[in-house]
Image: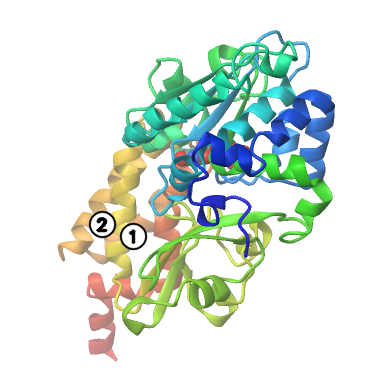
């Protein structure tokens, strides 16, 4: 298959400006800026049904259309925080095909008539951020970024910013705060980033994921209809699936949305390592509910709707496999510890809830938990339900309730309930 996003797999030197442009690079930006109005660009992206690849799957064209046209200052922010456990697709795109990300961001910027683009990279991407600055300088030298782009009169500098390495700074409003030099904590919404008062420096701002924007040059060059031919009606286009955990061949796989878990894991990913049986799947890293590896789940198409219908989320498609030997309580404890560590502490249900959950898991794993701890374990996520300022507090609930729903007997073993029941019988 020829790649749309991971073109570096077909053209290894595509990170170089000369190779990128020799293979059609920046033609879409040229087409947009010299032949299309900003509204026409938004319409093509709307018609393509491109949905955000950062987690929520929100249509990109709709987000762009929310930006008030009369605002004087507007921004595009590229979310390159990539902190979700098991997600490593944006890194490959930024490292191996960076001009495509820059071109996609500039087309988005043209569509909303932005005054600047910021690429926000997680702190650990420091080496990558420096390389990106060199790629941006190449684009500027060719009059594709910066002042008076392609002689159109529209100017748009592109800047790279490094975070300090916090998961919460992937959440768009915490990211904007961090970019502004404030504490990286989510903002109260509304106003949303696209609205006046809600974005970067409180100006209307589009925040899009790296992979989302990487789709845009292809859509402009090939048209919305061609893009919709890939994937399914409601989940269009290609997607990079990050396969990890107990996979035989972990890595990034660019495939059309709508392939099944079974196809991804067994046909493309070589199955489970060491020829073990598959016990469970985390379809969206630590954030989405775990699914047992039943036939129904394995036959589920990887789309935003279908994964939701079986009780989880596609998210950024970081598919983590857990083999038959995995201790599910241990796995849930690891995820809860992560959320407790990454909770920014701004709201009480998340700050205290993740702390209490972490303590209960510590008791479970050390053999000190009682059946009462199991009851408390069930009530804490209920008390966080819908009461947190951002989605981290909601993500932190799922390792508990989903593992309890599907693998309750493993918890019962930890608190000795199973043995007690067996003795009574
Ligand atoms: C705790 C948390 C962490 C997030 N981390 C990321 C991230 O690392 N990268 C990302 O693109 N989106 C992340 N998001 C989603 C962003 O808030 C936002 O929805 C996304 O950047 C929008 O881009 P898209 O519409 O192109 O998907 C995160 C959300 C939450 C709640
Ligand atoms: S839910 Fe958690 S991470 Fe989000 S704002 Fe509240 S305390 Fe911070």
Relative to residue 110, is residue 197 drawn left or right? Answer: left
Please identify the quarter of the rendering in which residue 132 is found.
top left
Mark 2 Cα-neighbour bin, 10 Å: few <14, some 14–19, many ≥20: many
Which of the 4 quarters of the picture holds residue 30? top right
Task: State whether residue 4 is above or below residue 244.
Answer: above
Image color mode: rainbow
Residue 327 at what x, y percent from top left?
A: 29, 71
Q: Tell me what residue is drawn at x 78 percent, y 47 percent.
A: 222
Quick one: SS at disc 1? helix
Q: CA distance from mark 1 to mark 2?
A: 8 Å
Q: Is residue 390 above or below residue 48?
A: above
**Do the residues bearing badges 1 and 2 touch, measured as CB atoms within 8 Å?**
yes
Q: Nearer the viewer, residue 300 or 247?
A: 247
Q: Please tell me which residue lies in front, 354 or 34.
A: 34
Q: Where residue 339 sits in the image (x, y, percent)?
A: 35, 45
Task: Name the residue: 28% across, 80% down.
Answer: 418
Camera-side mark, 1 or 2 = 1
Q: Which residue is mark 1?
A: 332
Looking at the image, which residue is at 47% across and 71% down? 269
Count the marks: how many? 2
According to the picture, the residue beneath numbered tag 2 turns out to be 361
Task: Specify whether residue 386 is in view.
Answer: yes
Q: Earlier in the sequence, mark 1 or mark 2?
A: 1
Q: Is residue 112 above or below residue 360?
A: above
Q: Is residue 389 visible?
A: no
Furthest-bottom residue in this view: 425
Ligand 2's quadrant: top left
């Amino acid at each position: 298959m020829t790649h749309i996003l991971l073109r570096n797999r077909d053209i290894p030197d595509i990170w170089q400006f000369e190779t990128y442009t020799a293979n059609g690079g920046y033609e879409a930006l040229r087409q947009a800026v010299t032949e299309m109005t900003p509204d026409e660009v938004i319409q093509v992206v709307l018609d393509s049904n491109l949905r955000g690849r950062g987690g929520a799957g929100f249509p990109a064209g709709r987000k762009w259309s929310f930006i008030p046209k009369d605002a004087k200052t507007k921004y595009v922010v590229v979310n390159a925080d990539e902190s979700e456990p098991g997600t490593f697709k944006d890194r490959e795109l930024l490292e191996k095909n960076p001009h495509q990300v820059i071109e996609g961001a500039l087309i988005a910027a043209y569509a909303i008539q932005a005054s600047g683009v910021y690429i926000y990279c997680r702190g650990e991407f420091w080496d990558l951020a420096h390389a990106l600055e060199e790629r941006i300088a190449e684009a500027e030298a060719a009059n594709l970024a910066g002042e008076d782009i392609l002689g159109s009169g529209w100017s748009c500098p592109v800047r790279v910013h490094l975070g300090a390495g916090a998961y919460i700074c992937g959440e768009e409003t915490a990211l904007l705060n961090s970019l502004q030099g404030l504490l990286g904590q989510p903002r109260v919404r509304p106003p949303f980033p696209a609205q006046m008062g809600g974005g970067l420096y409180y100006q209307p701002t589009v925040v899009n994921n790296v992979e989302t924007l990487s789709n845009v040059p292809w859509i402009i060059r090939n048209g919305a209809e061609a893009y919709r031919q890939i994937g399914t009606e409601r989940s269009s286009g290609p997607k990079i699936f990050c396969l990890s955990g107990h996979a035989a061949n972990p890595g990034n796989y660019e495939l059309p949305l709508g392939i099944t878990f079974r196809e991804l894991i067994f046909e493309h990913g070589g199955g489970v390592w060491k020829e073990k049986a598959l016990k469970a799947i985390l379809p969206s890293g630590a954030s989405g509910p775990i699914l047992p590896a039943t036939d129904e789940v394995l036959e589920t198409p990887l789309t935003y709707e279908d994964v939701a219908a079986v009780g989880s989320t596609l998210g950024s498609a970081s598919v983590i496999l857990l083999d038959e030997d995995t201790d599910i309580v241990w796995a849930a404890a690891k995820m809860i510890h992560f959320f407790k560590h990454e909770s920014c502490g701004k709201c009480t249900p998340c700050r205290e809830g993740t702390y209490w959950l972490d303590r209960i898991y510590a008791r479970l794993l050390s053999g000190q938990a009682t059946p009462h701890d199991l009851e408390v374990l069930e009530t804490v996520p209920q008390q966080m339900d819908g009461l947190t300022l951002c989605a981290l507090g909601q993500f932190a609930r799922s390792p508990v309730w989903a593992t309890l729903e599907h693998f309750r007997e493993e918890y019962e073993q930890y608190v000795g309930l199973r043995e007690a029941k067996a003795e009574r019988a």
